[in-house]
């Protein structure tokens, strides 16, 4: 009986605990706030990739993308959208000002969208490298991508299409034909491109019923900020130009100074940024180092084979480090042009002051002021009478005191065995004139 009472007591306690557990407070969920600021480019994708991985490893349930961007590169926006589609986390786009162009495309891939009252979404035109509207083929592909993005979150695709294609007419939303659609917060909510309008991030948290959640705000590290800056397609050609010009100046200068430091620093920043952004691997850096070694070897080896191989390896390493071969190729061409122009300027204006140029450029002038003459001017022959040995048509040979001399007339024909007078001597050029009867 005693053991029966003990067992019964334990069972009663267990049942009581099970009944009480549901009423106990559960641990708060984890929310990650990830900013999408400024231009959409490869460095941003690398940061977001790291942020999503960290959120998943921390067991987060929701990721809130704090968006304020004027847009950016289509290929990068596609990579970010794929990252959002593949994550098991719930994604919420909080448009904290603007989600334009590529930013609109990213927002449409979120599970939910919320906007501040002054927020805007749209104007998703494709722009080429010169800042002009892209060709029809690119516009068509981008329009299809915008439609797919809208459909993936169960939104009416006609508004996404109007954001990308200005031929779509939606005048009731300030998008008549010829203008791209940009929705305000109220308009976006009306056409169900937004789940709601909130005044702040705190209000968003309250609206989502996440007030008890632990909010972790992720920010870019210093390395990621540097990577975003140096991988920008506008900055890349500037860095490569500084690197090429600095290294060329240093190559032709004694010792190692400011130019070489600038060149190596620019090249180091280029590879560091692309390495942090996940665009470059160590193989591109190794290839660059081998190329530099060949360039240095060219200074000590005859011929130009080592230099050509080194230059090819360096260009190859730069192309390999970039995410887009076309953009990187254009950057390399710009850098080479700057290097050539810089080389010409250096030789033209500063070559005399550089010891390296003193070794490879001939400075001695072979002029008469320094005692150099190519031929002796025989002025003593002027006025002498000679005989044409061959017909002068107008050039030929004359004989003077047993000496054969190449001569030329003033332009006329002189037959052989005719008396001619030497009237001019200019180096090796002897000019004669036929002597007529009665002349001396």
Image (cartoon, rainbow, N blue to C red):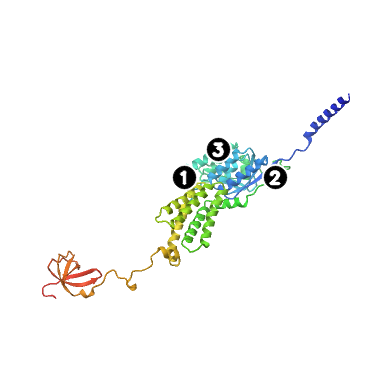
Residue position marked by numbered label 1 in the rendering? 135
Query: Label 1 crowding class (10 Å Cα cut-off): few <14, some 14-19, many 20+?
Result: few
Residue 159, x across and y down, in percent: 56, 40
Q: Nearer the viewer, residue 127 or 161?
A: 127
Q: Can residue 104 be seen in this view?
A: yes
Q: Residues within 10 Å of mark 2 (few under 14, many from 20)?
A: some
Residue named by callout 2: 215
Kind of element beneath mark 2: strand
Image label count: 3
Tell me the distance, in whole angstroms, between the alpha carbons under discs 2 and 1.
44 Å
SS of the residue at dot 3?
A: helix
In primary-sequence order, the first of circles 1 and 3 is: 1
Query: Residue 243 or 354: which is nearer the viewer?
Result: 354
User: In the image, 97: left or right of 296?
Assistant: right
> Whole-Å distance between the Cαs marked 3 and 2?
31 Å
Give the secondary structure at mark 1: loop
Q: Which of 305 and 43 is in front in this view?
A: 305
Task: Between residue 357 and residue 338, name the one nearer to us.
Answer: 357
Mark carried by residue 148: 3
When asked about the image quadrant of residue 189, the answer is top right
Marks 1/3 in contact by CB < 8 Å: the verdict is no
Q: x, y percentage for residue 285?
A: 52, 50
* Badge 3 or badge 2: first in the primary sequence: 3
Note whether 239 is above or below 152 in the view shown: below
The picture places residue 31, in percent across and down from the top left corner, at: 68, 43
Can you name the residue that lies furthest to the top here?
1
Asked where in the image residue 52 lies, by quadrant, the reply is top right
Task: Report the mark closest to the observer, 3 or 2.
Answer: 2
Q: How far apart are marks 1 and 3 (CA)?
A: 20 Å
Residue at the (57%, 36%) spot, across then down: 151
Instruction: Report crowding for label 3: few under 14, some 14 to 19, many 20 or more residues within 10 A (C-alpha).
Output: some
Query: Which residue is found at the position 50% from the left and 63% from the top?
Result: 255
């Amino acid at each position: 009986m005693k053991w029966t009472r003990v067992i019964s007591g334990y069972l009663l306690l267990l049942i009581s605990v099970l009944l009480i557990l549901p009423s106990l407070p559960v641990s708060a969920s984890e929310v990650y706030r990830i900013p999408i600021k400024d231009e959409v480019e490869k460095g941003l994708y690398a940061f977001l990739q790291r942020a999503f991985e960290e959120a998943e490893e921390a067991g987060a349930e929701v990721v809130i993308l704090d968006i304020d961007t004027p847009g950016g590169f289509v290929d990068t926006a596609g990579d970010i959208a794929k990252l959002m589609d593949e994550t098991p986390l719930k994604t919420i786009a909080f448009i904290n000002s603007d989600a334009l162009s590529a930013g609109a495309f990213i927002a449409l891939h979120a599970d939910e969208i919320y906007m501040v009252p002054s927020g805007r979404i749209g104007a998703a035109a494709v722009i080429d490298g010169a800042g002009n509207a892209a060709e029809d083929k690119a516009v068509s592909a981008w329009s299809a991508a915008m439609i797919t993005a809208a459909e993936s979150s169960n939104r009416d695709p006609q508004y996404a299409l109007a954001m990308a294609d200005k031929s779509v007419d939606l005048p009731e939303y300030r998008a008549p034909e010829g203008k791209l659609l940009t929705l305000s917060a109220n308009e976006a909510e009306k056409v169900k491109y937004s789940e709601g309008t909130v005044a702040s991030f705190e209000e968003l948290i309250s609206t989502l019923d996440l007030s008890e959640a632990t909010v972790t705000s992720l920010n870019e590290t210093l390395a990621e900020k540097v990577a975003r800056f140096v991988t920008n397609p506008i900055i890349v050609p500037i860095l490569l130009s500084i690197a090429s010009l600095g290294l060329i100046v240093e190559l032709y200068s004694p010792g190692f100074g400011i130019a070489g430091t600038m060149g190596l620093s620019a090249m180091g920043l280029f590879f560091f940024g692309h390495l942090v952004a996940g665009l470059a691997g160590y193989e591109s850096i190794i290839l660059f180092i081998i190329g530099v070694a060949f360039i240095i070897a060219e200074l000590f080896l005859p011929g130009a084979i080592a230099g050509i191989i080194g230059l090819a390896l360096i260009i190859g390493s730069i192309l390999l480090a970039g995410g887009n071969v076309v953009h990187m190729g254009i950057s390399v061409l710009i850098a080479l042009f700057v290097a050539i122009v810089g080389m010409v300027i250096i030789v033209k204006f500063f070559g005399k002051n550089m010891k390296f140029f003193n070794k490879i450029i001939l400075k001695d002038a072979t002029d008469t002021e320094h005692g150099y003459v190519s031929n002796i001017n025989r002025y003593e022959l002027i006025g002498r009478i000679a005989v044409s040995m061959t017909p002068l048509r107008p050039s030929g040979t004359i004989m003077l005191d047993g000496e054969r001399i190449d001569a030329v007339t003033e332009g006329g024909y002189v037959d052989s065995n005719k008396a001619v007078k030497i009237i001019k001597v200019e180096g090796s050029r002897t000019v004669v004139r036929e002597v007529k009867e009665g002349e001396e």
